[in-house]
Image (tube, rainbow, N blue to C red):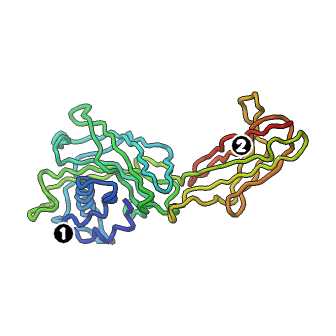
């Protein structure tokens, strides 16, 4: 979930499971997901320096003998304004022979973070821990998800672009984070950063309308449209300004589009240009995309030329 909104909540390590702000929103997650996220967050925070201050050894988990490799995630994830989006992640986990990855309280999960690993601007997780299948006595193939809930304001427009991936593992070894006798020194933890990158993009939409229809040969056709993208700050779609967009055409009996011209969106994302009518066919706009916004192609609009 959104790290920048929850840093304050984790500063008090002794605060039982008051760290549930790290979990997915209550509207989308069950209690087990909330508890798992909070418990791991408590251990993670103890394992790291906080505000430049090293955490005392007696308040830290021990270094778990685990490493991660072969991390795979989609090259880009398109996120709109309201719908839940989940992207699958796979990775290999290598561990010491004494690490019991089949224990009920052993947890591993993937993470996406924006900015530096030590002080990320934002972090995203999955609703549930990853599931792992042993491939040898010391290796396992793991599969999990990263879940996005834009309607819960976990993403800001400034978050669009490149995110880095990490993976972590926590061995609670029977210790209960909410218990009065919780001994964090008996908990093992390992986090490995910089395993991969992905683009988290503001979903885009592109429309087209060619008119008049029908039109006489040799007369002008006006082709309008709009390029918009998700505004995560407002929960709406707004015009994408000053972006190059290709106007393309294909003849009625052809399967191939060719570019007629390239124009730019105006101050509200609108598109407008004119062409001369020649033969029956379809007009469409195409947008190549940017690092923050995926490519988009409008459905072709047919024009009957008489």
Cβ–Cβ below 8 Å for labels 2 and 1?
no
Q: Residue at x 29, y 66 (%)?
A: 49
Give the Cα separation between the discs numbered 2 and 1: 59 Å
Tag nearer the camera, 2 or 1: 2
Q: How many marks?
A: 2
Q: Residue at x 41, y 53 (%)?
A: 148
Dot 1 lies on which element? loop
Relative height, residue 2 to residue 212 (above, below): below
Q: Residue at x 38, y 39 (%)?
A: 70
Mark toward the start of the polypeptide (2 vs 1): 1
Which residue is outermost to the right? Answer: 218
Residue 306 lies, in percent from the top left, at 86, 36
Residue 72 lies, in percent from the top left, at 41, 41
Left/right of residue 202 with respect to residue 179 in the rendered view? right
Left/right of residue 297 with respect to residue 263 in the rendered view? left
Which residue is outermost to the left? Answer: 181
Which quadrant of the figure contains the N terminus? Answer: bottom left
Q: Which residue is mark 1?
A: 14
Dot 2 lies on which element? strand
Residue 219 lies, in percent from the top left, at 89, 45
Q: Residue at x 20, y 62 (%)?
A: 60
Residue 98 lies, in percent from the top left, at 15, 42
Rendered image: mark on residue 154 = none
Left/right of residue 44 with respect to residue 4 in the rendered view? left
- Label 2 crowding class (10 Å Cα cut-off): few <14, some 14-19, many 20+? many
Q: Nearer the viewer, residue 209 or 140?
A: 209
Q: Nearer the viewer, residue 305 or 298?
A: 305
Left/right of residue 133 with respect to residue 114 in the rendered view? left
Q: Nearer the viewer, residue 232 or 41?
A: 232
Q: Which residue is mark 2?
A: 284
- Label 1 crowding class (10 Å Cα cut-off): few <14, some 14-19, many 20+? few
Residue 36 falls in image quadrant: bottom left
């Amino acid at each position: 979930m959104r790290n920048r909104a929850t840093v304050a909540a984790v500063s008090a390590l002794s605060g039982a499971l008051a760290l549930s702000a790290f979990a997915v929103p209550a509207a989308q997650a069950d209690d087990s997901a909330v508890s798992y996220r909070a418990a791991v967050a408590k251990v993670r925070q103890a394992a790291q320096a906080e505000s430049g201050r090293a955490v005392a050894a007696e308040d830290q988990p021990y270094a778990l003998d685990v490493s991660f490799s072969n991390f795979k995630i989609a090259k880009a994830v398109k996120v709109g304004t309201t719908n839940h989006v989940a992207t699958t992640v796979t990775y290999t986990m290598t561990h010491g022979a004494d690490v019991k990855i089949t224990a009920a309280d052993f947890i591993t999960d993937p993470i996406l973070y924006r900015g530096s690993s030590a002080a990320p601007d934002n972090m995203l997780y999955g609703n549930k821990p990853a599931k792992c299948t042993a491939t040898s006595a010391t290796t396992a193939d793991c599969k999990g998800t990263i879940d996005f809930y834009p309607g819960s304001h976990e993403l800001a427009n400034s978050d669009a672009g490149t995110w880095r991936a990490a993976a972590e593992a926590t061995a609670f070894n029977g210790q209960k984070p909410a218990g009065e006798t919780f001994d964090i020194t008996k908990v093992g933890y390992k986090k490995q950063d910089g395993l991969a990158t992905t683009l988290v993009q503001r979903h885009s939409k592109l429309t087209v309308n060619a008119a008049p229809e029908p039109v006489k040969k040799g007369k002008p056709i006006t082709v309008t449209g709009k390029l918009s993208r998700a505004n995560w700050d407002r929960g709406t779609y707004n015009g994408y300004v000053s972006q190059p967009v290709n106007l393309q055409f294909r003849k009625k009996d052809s399967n191939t589009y060719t570019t007629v011209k390239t124009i730019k969106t105006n101050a509200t994302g609108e598109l407008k240009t004119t062409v001369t009518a020649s033969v029956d066919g379809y007009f469409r706009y195409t947008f190549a995309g940017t690092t923050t916004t995926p490519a988009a192609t409008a459905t072709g609009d047919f024009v009957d030329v008489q």
